[in-house]
Amino acid sequence: MTETPTGRRPGVRFVLRLGRRVIVDSLYLLTAPVTAAAGLLVVLAGLGAAAVGRRPAERADASDPGLWLGVAHAVAVLPVALVTSVVTAMWWFVSLAAATSALRSSARPAGSMRPMTLTMGDAESHVALSLGLTSPAERLAFGTVAGLAMLCALPLVTRACVAVQAGLGRTLLSDASPLHRRISGLERERDTARAQTVAAVTAEAAALRRLERDIHDGPQQRLVRLALELGRAQHNFDSRPELVRTALADALLQTEEALEELRALSRGIAPPILVDRGLHAALSALAARSTVPVEFDADLLEHRLDAAVEATAYFVIAEAMTNVAKHSYADRCTIGVRHREGTMRVWVTDDGVGGAAVSKGHGLRGLEERLQAAGGRLLVTSPYHGPTTITAELPCC
């Protein structure tokens, strides 16, 4: 057996730690009745002061279940503390007395004694167990061994007594107080609001970066070429009419392509048809423009939803349709809309290759953050070889 740097063997250190723990637990159990009685007196004094209080707030506190649970604990813990204290004291006394019986006994003459017998019951019906032990030496040896065994079991006894008191506290002093529930609820609401705020800021920043990139790579380049073509037409207006006609034709083409790209970008923000005619009409127009054949499966909404809910639902469908056109290699897809019991549910299903996943840097991750900011959630089912279903659920009225 190796020794630690402090010079003590691991077994010795374990025994010392165990001894310290037993002593601390025993002192706590022996003094627990005093502290329990003091706590009960304080609680009763507080109840008496509250009973004669004139402030409405003090009288309202009497209906708090947490208050009465605390009173019940103060009342119940006193007898429990008394029992555990008596058990601890008696265990210490008996075990030490038995373990030291050989040291405290005076020399006795050797001889035969009556067998030691343990009897349970009364005179008419009883059980007797004979232990033998017909000599003083045997009885001293038995007492010493029994005392040492009780000392070895003392850590278990003290821990069991402490566990009883702790269990009583956990049972009565639970989180049943309305104030505690209110605080816990506010903390959960705060964490949810903080997560939604972070998700909203992240989604908004990502959307702005994407919009900036798309404008730079699309309409901005078209407009630059349009300006060049118009400048060339102006420069050759009098001298080379054929070149002017060619430049104006190219300028017209660049104008049409820039307008088409701007319309495509506006679909990711909020197209005018969504603002004017609602989600159903906007999704119908989106389905009509899709390069993949679309089946539109939507219930007619009884009323216009909140503008933020409509914009989020439209954005999810538009982004999902873009993914279908770019990555799915699908032959057909379905756009679905349902509004049930305060929840807007929209989905896009395609028969493409599958394998879509929510990962960092991908469009679905941005959709998830946008939905989280609105209090909704994104569900993606996309096994390899398809089909793929992207579902968004949003709370709404």
Image: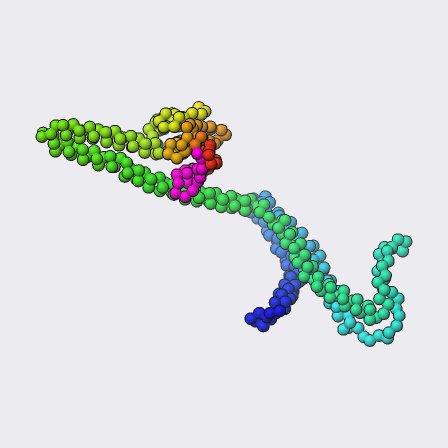
Q: How many labels does the image show?
A: 0
- Residue depicted at 71% across the width and 64% down the height: 151
Judge left or right: residue 219 versus residue 329.
left
How far across and down, in percent of the image, does residue 92 sit? 71, 64
- Residue depicted at 42% across the width and 25% down the height: 295
Q: Please determine whether, in this image, residue 170 is positioned above or below residue 328.
A: below
Instruction: From the viewer's side, name the closer residue of 185 and 225.
Output: 225
Instruction: From the viewer's side, name the closer residue of 353 and 363.
Output: 353
Q: What stretch is highlighted in magenta?
A: 353-374
Task: Tell me which corner region of the image, top left, top right, bottom left or bottom right, holds residue 77.
Answer: bottom right
How far across and down, in percent of the image, does residue 150 sit? 73, 63
- Residue depicted at 46% across the width and 32% down the height: 387
Q: Looking at the image, which residue sits at the far left?
A: 239
Instruction: From the viewer's side, name the closer residue of 143 and 249.
Output: 249
Judge left or right: residue 282 versus residue 231.
right
Question: What quarter of the picture does the N terminus occupy?
Answer: bottom right
Task: Tell me which corner region of the image, top left, top right, bottom left or bottom right, holds residue 394.
Answer: top left
Task: Reply yes or no: does residue 358 show up in magenta.
Answer: yes
Instruction: From the viewer's side, name the closer residue of 271 and 364.
Output: 364
How far across and down, in percent of the image, does residue 21 sit? 63, 63
Task: Tell me which corner region of the image, top left, top right, bottom left or bottom right, holds residue 225.
Answer: top left
- Residue depicted at 57% across the width and 46% down the height: 177
Instruction: Determine if residue 380 is in view.
Output: no
Task: Reply yes or no: does residue 356 show up in magenta.
Answer: yes
How far across and down, in percent of the image, does residue 283 sit? 39, 27
Instruction: Determine if residue 357 is in view.
Output: yes
Judge left or right: residue 218 versus residue 284.
left
